[in-house]
Amino acid sequence: MSVVDSRPQQPIIRVQGLRTVLGGHTIHQDLDLEVRRGEVLGVVGGSGTGKSVLLRTIVGLIRPAGGTVEVFGEDMATLKDGERRACETRWGVLFQDGALFSSLTVAQNVEVPLREHLRLPQRLMDEIAALKISMVGLPASSGAKFPSELSGGMRKRAGLARALALDPEIVFLDEPTAGLDPIGAAAFDELINALQRRLGLTVFMVTHDLDSLDTSCDRIAVLAEKQVLLTGTMHEMLAHDHPWVREYFHGPRARAALAAETAGPEAHA
Ligand SMILES: Nc1ncnc2c1ncn2[C@@H]1O[C@H](COP(=O)(O)OP(=O)(O)O)[C@@H](O)[C@H]1O
Ligand SMILES: [Mg+2]
């Protein structure tokens, strides 16, 4: 908490009364969500509940049918093109499918947002790419490699390096550990935690991974019935009696998280 500024902090993302309609189907109805600056928010929900659509709506790729989306205190719907582009430089996105350009090297992929938003000499872009590649724990040699030459976990890291290219304040991650083995997933969680601490990032992370939720997330938002049904800590999720929440957080996949929870708070250190 800042000593200089004692005003209550405005949420960095504020979604109010959001209605999203795609292909004639209402995906979100009256959805409210706030993300606080500096927190890691985990977004969970059954398959097809609209987690990815929510992420894409917040970053302006899908236009809401109703309600408001504010990021950095700006109402996204009222921004002019230039203002929107300025906002886009302040967040980075790792989409669900990773989506690195297969014909570009890892370093060139990281440079894509730099080219899109800044005019920098090539040498400086190369330096920034190398820095981001090292920040996500990839060896320097991977910069010259093509995505197809990397493992799944390394590709996720490369995608994260690209998301960090413009020194964003918010990083949006859509199921970053999906498809990784448990060790790779745990390493990625640690990386997110370390970056969040070091850079003071705000992280909006869609995930199915209960371990990620437990180790990385300050708060969890549950998407169900077209809304954010509840937000809270892992502890609060475990105490909640909504059927989906119970099933999800107490089902067989929840064993590890539950074990950590019952072992007491020191297990979370
Ligand atoms: N571009 C689109 N056009 C029409 N329907 C879509 C589109 N994208 C997603 N949907 C639908 O919206 C719903 C939510 O999708 P999504 O957000 O991808 O779910 P998830 O929670 O698994 O990420 C699904 O029923 C999906 O079929
Ligand atoms: Mg999804």
Image (cartoon, grey):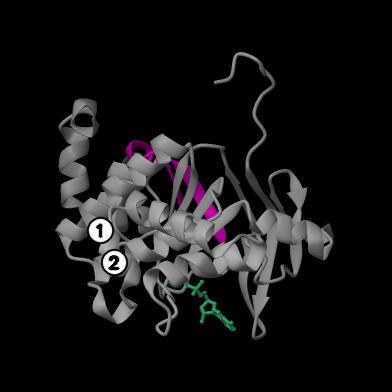
Camera-nearest residue between 146 and 1: 146
| Residue type at numbered disc 1 | Pro
Type of amino acid under label 2: Ser
Q: Nearer the viewer, residue 114 or 2?
A: 114
Q: Residue furthest top?
A: 3
Residue at image point 24% right, 27% down:
265
Residue at disc 1, secondary structure: loop
Can residue 35 be seen by looking at this rendering? yes
Q: Quadrant of the C terminus?
A: top left
Residue beneath the point at 68% across and 60% down = 18
Q: Which residue range is magenta in the image?
A: 218-237
Where is residue 186 shown, x and y percent of the image? 21, 52
The residue pinned by badge 1 equals 139
Residue drawn at (58%, 19%), measured in percent from left and top? 2
Residue marked by disc 2: 142
State whether the magenta stretch is mostly helix, strand or loop. Answer: strand
Where is residue 184? Give x, y as percent. Answer: 20, 59
Left or right: 247 as drawn, with respect to 27: left
168 vs 126, nearest the viewer = 126
Badge 2 element: helix
Vertical arrangement, residue 148 with respect to residue 211, above or below: below
Circle 1 packing at 10 Å, graded few (<14), some (14-19), many (20+), is few
Q: Is residue 244 magenta?
A: no
User: In front: 168, or 39?
Assistant: 168
Does 222 lie within the magenta span? Answer: yes
Is disc 2 in contact with disc 1, using a CB cutoff of under 8 Å?
yes
Find residue 18 and name its label: none
